[in-house]
Image: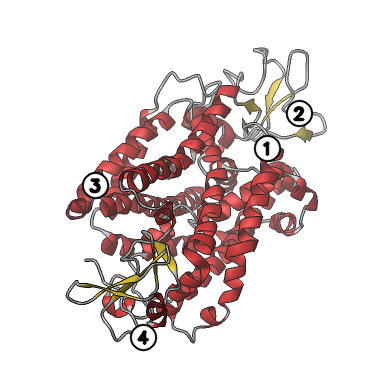
């Protein structure tokens, strides 16, 4: 939906004068000021002489927003920018709360529809086409960001914004929301636990430099975030300069920075529509880039589970995009922004943290960190520095990362405040709904665990240990790559299985868990019994590949 907002702003930017520069015919700031005061008495309501800022004096039956002293030209309080009024009352047509749904904005519907059509066109041809498109959507935003940065660093007051950006406020570290938002941002921007990394990496070659890619992506993310901060805070410093405020008073969190603060800042620049077009085009590209990975993850999951649908990849993509568009219609109503904030706060954060914790436990303790090392070594080679210093990653996955995630969940849960948007406090049922949505995301693990126990243990009468061990044919798909893997003992279907990288015999060897003789299956499929000692001494085995 944020991409849909950006599309609408992008279209509206093709004007000689930007509508949100002043209180124009679209605004209710003069004829109806009820959005900013609690009463309908407006005789003490004023506009700043240049027509840009909205104020009201603190008087009887009024709620103070800020004030402007006409005599000496001084002010205090935070002004309501025209871009604020434009976004909340013209673009969103925001209602009084999440449960006040009365109208649907067809402008937003059309923008949302256009966004999903564009996403489908880019993804329907498969990863070969979308991969080429991503080169543009990933690289070109850097060009736009650099252009915006050069312009912003030439503006008066930009140094105040940069100083505010570089000066740490250690006291904020005591706020649980800061830690939650920071961790959630890292998880989302790197697609950790969201499935995008696993999905896209499945198209890589077996010997792809996974470790190198990981370092490049992580470092690029840090550099990009820092660089974007220098650009954005330059404009915030400029906005504080022209409004006579402190930088902290113009800083806005969430969508406010993208759709209120920055759009107004560019209205004061020469050729304002050009800067607005560049900015919102950048937001569109960045938004599409993240949606591509999310939709590709859903499509690949469906086609992998129902392999007959692989030949109908375009149809599956169309159905997924259509369903997503239908679900997004709720966000196009006058209460849509409240719902968007609810989904943004509850569908990520804790769910992503818990999934990340489970991933660490599964890799380190269930699958086994040594087995994972064998996989990494087979792909990267034994001489790769990542393999040589694997113990560092092993310590992180086994101890440090799980403990940090557990601490983060506990720390943020103890003092996590009820959801709030500005001065609006969400009702209790909305908070409960948010937690229920989070539980729904995690319920897939529970339901599949119940299914696995019923089917594999109760119906098939297998040992419970089968549920925490790889399938018999687990390993690289191609036989030449499978020979490179050296797995340690793992349990499966009542047997202990071991594979070695030096293979001379085409034999599948299994040793029963109950301590009896092992069973060897030769190339002709005949079973022969050998002693446990013979099974232990056999060190060159090839695992049968099930195609």
Q: Give the image location of residue 154, x and y in percent.
A: 63, 61
Q: Work out whether 258 lies above or below 402.
A: above
Considering only order in the chain, which callout, 4 or 3, is on the residue closer to the N terminus?
3
Considering only order in the chain, which callout, 3 or 2, is on the residue closer to the N terminus?
2
List the single residue furthest toward the right. 72
Report, in whole angstroms, how far the alpha carbon at label 2 lies from the one at label 4. 81 Å
Report, in whole angstroms, how far the alpha carbon at label 1 lies from the one at label 3. 39 Å
**Residue on which the image places disc 4:** 502
**Residue on which the image places disc 1:** 416
Callout in the foreground (2, 4): 4
- SS class of the residue under badge 3? helix
For disc 3, the neighbor class at 10 Å (few under 14, some 14 to 19, many from 20) is some
**Residue on which the image places disc 2:** 67
Q: Give the image location of residue 275, x and y in percent.
A: 50, 52
For disc 1, the neighbor class at 10 Å (few under 14, some 14 to 19, many from 20) is few
Res. 499 image quadrant? bottom left
**Pointer 2 and pointer 3: residues touching (CB < 8 Å)?**
no
Q: Work out whether 341 lies above or below 502.
A: above
Residue at point 80% right, 49% down? Answer: 171
**Residue on which the image places disc 3:** 316
Whether residue 137 is visible, yes or no, is no
**Lateral position of residue 546 relative to residue 267, left or right:** left
């Amino acid at each position: 939906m944020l991409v849909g907002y950006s599309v609408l702003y992008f279209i509206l930017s093709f004007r000689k004068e930007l509508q949100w520069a002043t209180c124009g015919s679209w605004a209710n700031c003069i004829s109806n000021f009820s959005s900013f005061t609690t009463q309908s008495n407006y005789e003490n309501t004023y506009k700043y002489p240049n027509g840009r800022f909205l104020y009201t004096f603190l008087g009887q039956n009024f709620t103070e927003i800020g004030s402007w002293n006409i005599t000496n030209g001084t002010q205090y309080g935070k002004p309501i920018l025209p871009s604020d009024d434009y976004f909340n009352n013209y673009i969103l047509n925001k209602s009084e709360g999440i449960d006040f749904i009365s109208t649907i904005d067809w402008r937003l519907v059309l923008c949302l529809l256009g966004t999903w059509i564009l996403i489908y066109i880019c993804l329907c041809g498969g990863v070969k086409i979308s991969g080429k498109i991503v080169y543009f959507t990933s690289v070109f935003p850097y060009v736009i960001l650099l252009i915006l940065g050069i312009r912003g660093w030439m503006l008066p007051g930009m140094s105040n914004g940069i100083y505010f950006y570089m000066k740490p406020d250690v006291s904020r570290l005591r706020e649980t929301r800061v830690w939650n938002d920071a961790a959630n941002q890292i998880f989302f921007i790197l697609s950790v636990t969201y499935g995008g990394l696993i999905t896209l990496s499945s198209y890589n070659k077996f010997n792809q430099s996974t470790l190198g890619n990981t370092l490049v992506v992580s470092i690029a993310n840090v550099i990009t975030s820092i660089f974007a901060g220098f650009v954005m805070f330059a404009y915030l410093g400029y906005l504080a300069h022209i409004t006579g405020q402190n930088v902290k008073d113009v800083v806005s969190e969430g969508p406010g920075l993208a759709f209120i603060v920055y759009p107004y800042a560019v209205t004061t620049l020469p050729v304002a529509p050009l800067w607005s077009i560049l900015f919102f085009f950048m937001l569109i590209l960045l938004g599409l880039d993240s949606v591509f990975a999310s939709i590709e993850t859903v499509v690949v999951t469906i086609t992998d589970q129902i392999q007959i649908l692989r030949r109908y990849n375009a149809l599956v993509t169309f159905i997924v995009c259509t369903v997503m568009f239908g679900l997004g219609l709720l966000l196009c109503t006058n209460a849509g922004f409240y719902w968007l904030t609810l989904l943004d706060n509850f569908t990520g954060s804790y769910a992503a943290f818990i999934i990340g914790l489970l991933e660490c436990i599964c890799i380190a303790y269930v699958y086994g960190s040594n087995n994972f090392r064998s996989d990494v070594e087979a792909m990267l080679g034994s001489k790769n520095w990542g393999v040589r210093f694997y113990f560092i990653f092993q310590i992180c996955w086994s101890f440090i990362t799980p403990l940090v995630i557990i601490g983060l969940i506990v720390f943020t849960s103890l003092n996590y405040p009820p959801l709030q948007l500005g001065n609006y406090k969400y009702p209790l049922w909305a908070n409960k709904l948010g937690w229920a949505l989070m539980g729904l995301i995690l319920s897939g693990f529970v339901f599949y665990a119940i299914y696995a126990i019923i089917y594999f243990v109760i119906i098939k009468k297998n040992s419970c240990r089968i549920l925490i061990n790889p399938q018999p044919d687990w390993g690289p798909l191609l036989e030449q790559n499978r020979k490179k893997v050296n797995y340690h003992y793992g349990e499966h279907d009542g047997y202990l299985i071991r594979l070695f990288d030096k293979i001379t015999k085409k034999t599948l060897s299994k040793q029963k868990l109950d301590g009896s003789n092992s069973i060897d299956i030769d190339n002709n499929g005949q079973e022969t019994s050998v002693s446990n000692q013979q099974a232990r001494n056999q060190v060159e085995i090839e695992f049968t590949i099930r195609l």
